[in-house]
Image (spheres, rainbow, N blue to C red):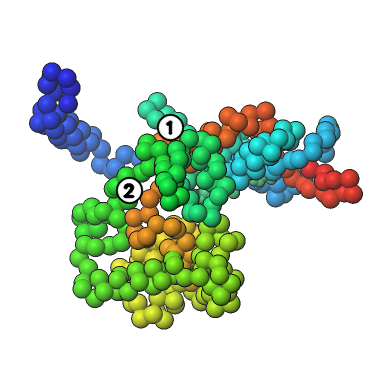
Amino acid sequence: MAAGGAVNRRKFLLASAGAAAGAAYVWRRGRTTAPSITGTMAGPSVDLGHLLRDGGIPEPTDERQVPVVIVGGGVSGLSAGWKLQKAGLTDFEILELESEVGGNSRYGENRVTPFPWGAHYLPLPTEESRIVRELLEELGVIEGYTPDGQPIYQERALCFAPQERLYMHGRWQDGLMPVLGITSRDRDQYERFREIIDHYTHYQGADGRKAFAIPMTFSSRDPELLALDQLSMQDFLFQHDLVSEPLHWYVNYACRDDYGCTSSDVSAWIGLHYFASRDSSGFEHVQVLTWPEGNGWIVRQLHRKLEDQIVTGALVCRLENHDSGVRV
Ligand SMILES: Cc1cc2nc3c(=O)[nH]c(=O)nc-3n(C[C@H](O)[C@H](O)[C@H](O)COP(=O)(O)OP(=O)(O)OC[C@H]3O[C@@H](n4cnc5c(N)ncnc54)[C@H](O)[C@@H]3O)c2cc1C
């Protein structure tokens, strides 16, 4: 560990184990309940939200004219600002109600490290995600392209295994698809599900578009595929005789993770989109980019570029269309 062998691995582990045992002993003697975790809610200001809902916002006292106003300084608003700036427009404002930009991709910082409050990784952008790739090129995260057109990513930003682990039956396992204690039937059903996802990953609709793409708007509009929107993801599994409990748990987890709803609440179309829209083959180990502050790193970079245009603490409460423009 340290140069000169002042602390070797064995000594370090023994010392750590001793410290942990000591801490546990003090805790057992001194307390009868687990220590409570203190904290506050980060994120949208409840007061401002209520003000917006209930009204009572004073009339404006000042008026100014700006060619373009972007409402909201989340990743969408900041990206829009970045694009405008690239197109040569600098006379615009990004109005953000919070004291900091970033929205769901906001980050915090403590004495040790920056950290994400929400979004913490970015899946490798698909071929269709041209603007995301453009941004990553500009930020130096895409360092170049291979002769066959595959992006070369900055090593530091790539998240290496183990990316995600699952704790079950008192043990950690790699990946989120349960493998500990499953039956051979579960295994067969995983395989069948994999084949279905593989099929949809490479499937093109009658209009020649990818069945499921990111950005979503590039996905096929083939009615046969759109019919999947009339069925729940859970029913889709049942229709394919996929009844394995751990498989259902996994698919349900994926739906909750991305859409905040269970597999019985989201449609098969959007459920399949989660698995079949990425470029990488094999859906369990999708490669992602990440930084200490999660996607907040991107926010930080965009913030730097847009400092002159960002106005924080600016709640937009009304938009009115007029012949001469929009009154914000
Ligand atoms: C817990 C969590 C984890 C996530 N994890 C990931 C992840 O790992 N990877 C990933 O890619 N995505 C993830 N996401 C999704 C990702 O964070 C969002 O898709 C993305 O940040 C959305 O950006 P946005 O700008 O569209 O919206 P938002 O982030 O919601 O930004 C909207 C902004 O507008 C402001 N605003 C709203 N109303 C007004 C108003 N009236 N006036 C002025 N300003 C206003 C808000 O304060 C906010 O800053 C996660 C989301 C959450 C909640």
Local crowd at mark 1 within 10 Å, few (<14), some, or many (≥20)? some
Local crowd at mark 2 within 10 Å, few (<14), some, or many (≥20)? few
Residue 35 pos. (x, y %)? 31, 39
Instruction: Name which quarter of the figure residue 43 lies in.
Output: top right
Q: Is residue 314 above or below residue 259?
A: above
Q: Can residue 140 be seen at all in this image of the molecule?
A: yes
Residue 120 pos. (x, y %)? 44, 44
Disc with the residue nearer the chain's start (1 vs 2): 1
Choose between 37 and 131: the one closer to the eye.
Answer: 131
Choose between 58 and 226: the one closer to the eye.
Answer: 226
Instruction: Name which quarter of the figure residue 81 lies in.
Output: top right
Q: Which residue is mark 1?
A: 114
Q: Residue at x 47, y 57 (%)?
A: 258
Residue 265 pos. (x, y %)? 50, 69
Q: Is residue 299 above or below residue 49?
A: above
Q: Residue at x 17, y 31 (%)?
A: 16
The secondary element bearing badge 1 is classed as strand
| Residue kind at label 2, given as amino acid type | Gln
Q: Nearer the viewer, mark 1 or mark 2?
A: 2
Q: Can residue 121 be seen at all in this image of the molecule?
A: no
Identify the image quadrant of the N terminus: top left
Instruction: Name which quarter of the figure residue 7 lies in.
Output: top left
Choose between 116 and 16: the one closer to the eye.
Answer: 116
**Separation of residues labelled 1 and 2 (CA atoms):** 19 Å
In the image as oriented, which residue stretches furthest toward the front?
147
Q: Residue at x 70, y 42 (%)?
A: 70
Residue 129 pos. (x, y %)? 54, 52
Asked if disc 1 and disc 2 are in contact, CB closer than 8 Å, the reply is: no
| Residue kind at label 1, given as amino acid type | Pro
Q: Which residue is mark 2?
A: 163
Q: Is residue 157 above or below residue 242?
A: above
The secondary element bearing badge 2 is classed as loop
